Each structure stands twice: as C-alpha cells, then as structure tokens.
Amino acid sequence: MKYVILIHSSPQPWGHPTGNFIPETKGVPQEQLDRMNADFERMLGELHERGELLGGEALADPASSTLYRWGDGKPVATDGPYSEAKEQLAGFFLIDVESRARAEEIAAQFAGPGETIELRPGMWPGGEEA
C-alpha cells in the first residue's frame, strides 16, 4: 500500500529543514533538537533498509511556483502559491507499507513543532486506493 506523507509548514524565510526556520523551534534546547534530528535520520535509514521508503523531496518556496489552470480553452499560467494559507506544502515522502496502521505509525514520527503532517493514500491505475 502506497502512501504520501505531506509536510505542511510555514518557515520564514523558506528553508529546509523547515524546523530551522519556524518560531516553534526557536525555544527548543539545541540538545533536544539534535536528538530529534538524529532520531529522524535513524528512522529514515530504517525505512530505507526495510524497503518502505520509496523517496522524498523538499520543495522550494511556494512563491516560486507556477500554477496552470484551464481557461478559455487552453492552459493559463499564473504565479503561485496555490493558496494564501499560512502553511504551505514543504515536502513529501512516498512510502510503501503493508497496512494503513503501519503508515500511520510512520507518519506520526514525521510530526514536529510547527509542522502539520498529512497522510494520504495513493490512487494508482484502476482508481483503487493503494
């Protein structure tokens, strides 16, 4: 079963890892941040070793995006971001796991101060959720 873990955040200025650029982490002691980062890197390594981590990518500033919508019978390009929401899509990870419960267990480990994590099943050819 394939799932996408979407990382929503609002770093100012935009940067990665997002935790380095959000106010919610400014008051966290460096020792705790170092431990959280080490735990996260270890988890990514374990997911890779198990074959559950298929990939992931940090995304550039939403202001650098271009949106394409259909208008007047053709695609029309406009500057991003897509929405005026406080949080924007900051990155994603694609996982392939045996169950929804395993996906939820993994996604919970991605949550950090000032970030929202979204777990969404993929829909692959045939229209079925993965």
Image (cartoon, grey):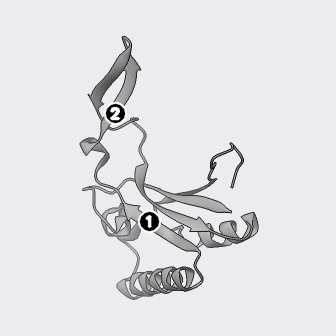
At 27% across and 56% down in the image, what residue appears?
14
At 67% across and 70% down in the image, what residue appears?
97
Q: Is residue 38 above or below residue 81?
A: below
Instruction: Determine which residue is flagged by label 1.
Output: 56
At 52% across and 81% down in the image, what residue appears?
48
Instruction: Determine which residue is flagged by label 2.
Output: 67
Residue type, numbered disc 2? Leu
Report, in whole angstroms, how far the alpha carbon at label 2 lies from the one at label 1. Answer: 22 Å
Give the secondary structure at mark 1. strand
Q: Is residue 10 above or below residue 66?
A: below
Q: Position of residue 68 (x, y in %)?
A: 35, 30
Instruction: Tell me: 90 left or right of 98.
Output: left
> Which quarter shows the N terminus?
bottom right
Give the secondary structure at mark 2. strand
Q: Position of residue 35 (x, y in %)?
A: 45, 87
Instruction: Tell me: 56 left or right of 101.
Output: left
How many other residues sit within 10 Å of disc 1, few (<14), some (14-19) or many (≥20)? some
| Residue situated in front as seen by the camera: 9 or 95 | 95
How many other residues sit within 10 Å of disc 2, few (<14), some (14-19) or many (≥20)? few
Residue type, numbered disc 1? Gly
At 39% across and 63% down in the image, what residue appears?
57
Q: Position of residue 47 (x, y in %)?
A: 56, 80
Q: Is residue 113 above or below residue 89?
A: below
